[in-house]
Amino acid sequence: MAVGIDIGGTKTAGALVDLAALRAGAAGADGVRAAGAVLRQARTPTPVGEGPDALLDAAAELVARLLEGTPRDRVRGVGVGTGGVVDSTTGTVLSATSVLPGWAGTEVAAGLGARCGLPVRADGDGNTTLLGEHAAGAARGASSVLLAAVGTGIGGALMTGGTLVRGARHAAGHLGHVAAPDAAGVPCSCGARGHVEAVSCGPAIVRRYTEATGTAVPGGLRELAARTGTDPGAARAVADGGRSLGVALAGLVNTFDPELVVIGGGVADIGAPFTDPLEEGLRGGLLPAVRTVRLARAALGSDASVLGAATLAG
Amino acid sequence: MAVGIDIGGTKTAGALVDLAALRAGAAGADGVRAAGAVLRQARTPTPVGEGPDALLDAAAELVARLLEGTPRDRVRGVGVGTGGVVDSTTGTVLSATSVLPGWAGTEVAAGLGARCGLPVRADGDGNTTLLGEHAAGAARGASSVLLAAVGTGIGGALMTGGTLVRGARHAAGHLGHVAAPDAAGVPCSCGARGHVEAVSCGPAIVRRYTEATGTAVPGGLRELAARTGTDPGAARAVADGGRSLGVALAGLVNTFDPELVVIGGGVADIGAPFTDPLEEGLRGGLLPAVRTVRLARAALGSDASVLGAATLAG
Ligand SMILES: [Zn+2]
Ligand SMILES: [Zn+2]
C-alpha cells in the first residue's frame, strides 16, 4: 500500500492505494474501482496564501486521515504530485506558478516526511498524472507517451521506454509553451508570446469567443462548452482551440515519435467539439513515418495524479 | 577499431576509427585529429538512381578500401548512418526521402554485412551525427541534447540520459516538422504546411530572399551567405530563417528540457548572421525554468555522422 497526494491550487486530494491491485485491474476509472485499488480517498482545501508550512500541514493531516487504522508497517510511503517544477530526486519545488504562490523552494518530501514519519517522494503533477494514466489509465501498456493536460494552463509529460523524461532541470513536459501559428504575438502566461497555451487553454478559448462575438461568458469554459451545440460561435472557439493544439502537438510527435498521445484536463472533458478538431490538426501535421500514432482521452480524470503519486512510493 | 560509413545523397564517406582514441581525445575536429582517432578516411560518389544494391556495393568497396592491410580480427564492425528512417535494431531503411530514391526497404545492415563479412549496424544520419558530436564534438559530456541539423532540410536527434531517443517507429528527431509562426500556410517538403523547415532550411532562406528582393541567387545559399555583409536583404533573409528556427526550438526545449542544443548542418556554417538571430529567437521563447540551456555550434561538420556511425559498431 502507498499514499498518493496531489497538492493543487484549490484542493489537496489523496488516496490510500493498493499498488498491486492498481496495476492488475482493468484500465480506466471503472477498472481501478473494480480492482479495489483505492482503499480510501479524501480531500481538503489547499490553504493557498498561508505559506508552505500550512500546505504541508494540510497534506500531513490528509495522510493521517487516510492511514487511520492502518498499521504503518504495511505502508510503503507517500508520493506527492504538485504544481510547479519539482526536483524529483530531492522532492523540492524548484519554481512555482501563481497557482501556488510561495511554493518555490519548499522541501516537500523532507517537510511532509518529517510530519508523517514515512518516506515521501514528490514530483510535478504533469509527471504524476502520466504515471497514473500509465499505471491504470489511457497509457497502460504504452512505452512512449506524450501527455497534454489542458486546463487553465497547458502542461504535460513525456515518457520513453516506460520511463518519464524529466529533463536536465526537472522541467520537461511544459508543452503548452511551444509555438503555434495562430498564437503569433499573443502574450502567454510565461511572459513570452506566441505559445499554444495562449490560444488553447480554457481561459484562452473563452477569451477568443468573447473577442469574436462581443459576448461575455460569466460561467467560463463550462458555460461555453454547454453552448457548443447551439451557438456556432462557441463551437468555433472551442474547435479553434483544439485545432491549434493539435497542430502544435503534431510537431512534438514528429520530433519525439511517441506511440501514444493522451489528452487530459478540464478542457479535454468538453469531448468531441474540442478533441475532433484537435485530432484533425494533429493528423494534418504528421510526417508519414509517424502517422500510426494513437490519440486517446485521459481515462482517470483528476484521480490520475493521486494514483500516479502513489506509484512514486512503490 | 571500427569503420564508420555515412551514405548521403551525393557522397558516401567513411573512416577507420580508433574508438578509444576518439573518446579520449579533446573535443572537436582538431581534438579528433590530435588524438589520432581517424586512422584512414575515404569517400566515393553515391550511385544514386542505380538502386539499393549499387549503393551497398559502393559502401562495401569503401569499407574494403578503408580496411586494406588491417587484419579483420582487429575490427569490431561497421556502423552506417544514412538518410531516411532507419530501424536501428534490424538496420533496415523504413522510409526514405527523394534524396535517396528507392532506398526504403533496404536491409542495410544485412546487405552490407554479407558484402563485408563484418557485423554491421545502421541508424538514421541524424542519430549518427549526434552520436559523433556526443563522442568527440560539441555534445561531449552532455547527457541530454537536442541536435538540429540545418541543410537542404532540417533534421536532428534527441538524447536523454546519454542515450538516443529513437521513438516508437524509429522516427524521432524530425524537428524540422514543427509549427513555426511565420511558416503559416507555407508548403513543407513533407506535404503538410506551416513547418519550420519550410522557412528555415537552406533552400527556404534563398527562396525568401528572392521573393523579398526579386533577385535570383544562382549560387544558392553559399552565394547568399557571402553577401550578408554587404546586402541587407541577404542578411535579413538569413536572420529571419535563424530566428524562425530559434522560436521553434524554444518550444522543444520547453518540452524536452535538454541540457544542450547543438546546431549543425551547412546553414549553421554561415555562423553569426544565422546563429545570432537563432539564439535570440530561442532565448525569447524559453520558460524561466529552462533558461540555462546551452547553445553550441556542431564541432565536427560532416565527419560527425561517420564518427558516430563508427561508435555504433563499438
Ligand atoms: Zn508560454
Ligand atoms: Zn514538414
Image (tube, coloured by chain):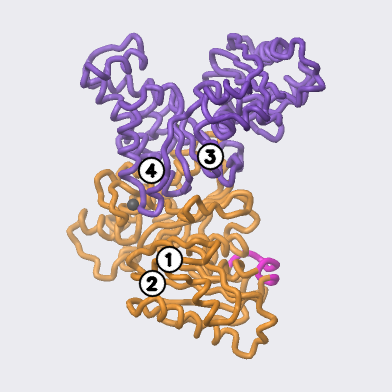
Chain colours: A purple, B orange
Q: Earlier in the sequence, mark 2 or mark 1?
A: 2
Q: Quadrant of the C terminus of chain B?
A: bottom right
Label 3 amino acid?
Answer: Leu
Q: Does residue B285 appear to the left or right of A80 in the view shown?
A: left
Q: Quadrant of the N terminus of chain B?
A: bottom right
Q: CA distance from mark 1 to mark 4?
A: 22 Å
Q: CA distance from mark 2 to mark 3?
A: 34 Å
**Residue B83 shows which numbered tag?**
1
Q: Is residue A253 visible?
A: yes
Q: Of tags 4 and 2, which is closer to the observer? A: 4
Pointer 1 indicates a residue of which chain?
B
Q: Are marks 2 and 1 in contact (CB under 8 Å)?
A: yes
Label 1 amino acid?
Answer: Gly
Label 2 amino acid?
Answer: Gly
**Residues drawn in magenta:** B20-28
Mark 4 sits on what residue? A250
- Quick one: label 4, few (<14), some, or many (20+) residues within 10 Å? many
Mark 3 sits on what residue? A158
**Residue occupying the point 31% across, 64% down:** B224
Residue B25 falls within the magenta-colored stretch: yes
Q: Residue A217 placed where, x, y %?
A: 30, 12
Label 4 amino acid?
Answer: Ala
Figure check: A87 above or below A162: above
Q: Do the dots labelled 3 and 4 sit on one chain? A: yes
